[in-house]
Image: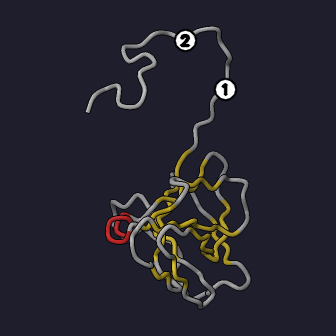
Amino acid sequence: MTQILKILRVVDADADLPLPAYQTLGAAGMDLRADTRGENFCLKPGDRHLFKTGLCFEIPDGYEVQIRPRSGLALKHGVTTLNAPGTIDSDYRGEVGVILINHGHTDFDVQHGDRIAQMVFAKVTRCEIVEVQDLTSSQRGAGGFGSTGK
């Protein structure tokens, strides 16, 4: 069964910007665009900025929207989303924003309408928390970072 994601444009948003859409049949994510309200923005190396999208979502209960980097921006420019993946909860109704950071060595210009991130619509599984006195053992045990080899 296909779920519905309701999208509302904020009052001062650019109504001509395309809504998020899957670009191919196999795509998991949809691109989000910067709604800079007509102004361009220079993201200097090391800087981060919250970019507005002009969109609010009504996400069905039991789902979330994940905000993820665009691989081309990361590879070509060193620009990525700062809290990846970011989560938009089903009860949030405010404007969706994307935090970009420039890990590159040169300025990165964000222009109005640029595709800056991708969103993935995902099912959420909730759990019940139970505090215990011990855990069952496993082959890995408490081995952490790098413990399984190179």
Which image quadrant: the C terminus?
top left
Q: Secondary structure at mark 2?
A: loop
C-alpha distance separating marks 2 and 1 = 16 Å
Above or below, comparing residue 143 to residue 3 in the picture:
above
Frontmost of labels 2 and 1 is 2
Q: Is residue 144 left or right of residue 14?
A: left
Residue under the image location 44 percent in, 65 percent down = 103
Task: Give the residue pinned by disc 1.
Answer: 128
Task: Give the residue pinned by disc 2.
Answer: 135
Horizontal and vertical percent position of residue 37: 63, 87
Picture quadrant of residue 17? bottom right
Horizontal and vertical percent position of residue 117: 48, 67
Picture disc at residue 47 = none
Query: Mark 2 or mark 1: which comes first in sequence?
Result: 1
**Which amino acid type is marked by label 2?**
Leu
Badge 1 density bin: few <14, some 14–19, many ≥20, Cα 10 Å? few
Scheme of image coloration: secondary structure
Residue under the image location 57 percent in, 56 percent down = 65
Badge 2 density bin: few <14, some 14–19, many ≥20, Cα 10 Å? few
Horizontal and vertical percent position of residue 123: 54, 46
Residue under the image location 46 percent in, 70 percent down = 31
Q: Secondary structure at mark 1?
A: loop
Q: Are marks 2 and 1 in contact (CB under 8 Å)?
A: no
Between 1 and 13, which is closer to the camera in this rendering? 13
Picture quadrant of residue 86? bottom right
Residue at the limit of the structure toward the bottom, as seen here: 38
Above or below, comparing residue 57 to residue 136 in the picture:
below
Horizontal and vertical percent position of residue 38: 59, 91
Q: How many marks?
A: 2
Residue under the image location 62 percent in, 74 percent down = 52
**Which amino acid type is marked by label 1?**
Glu
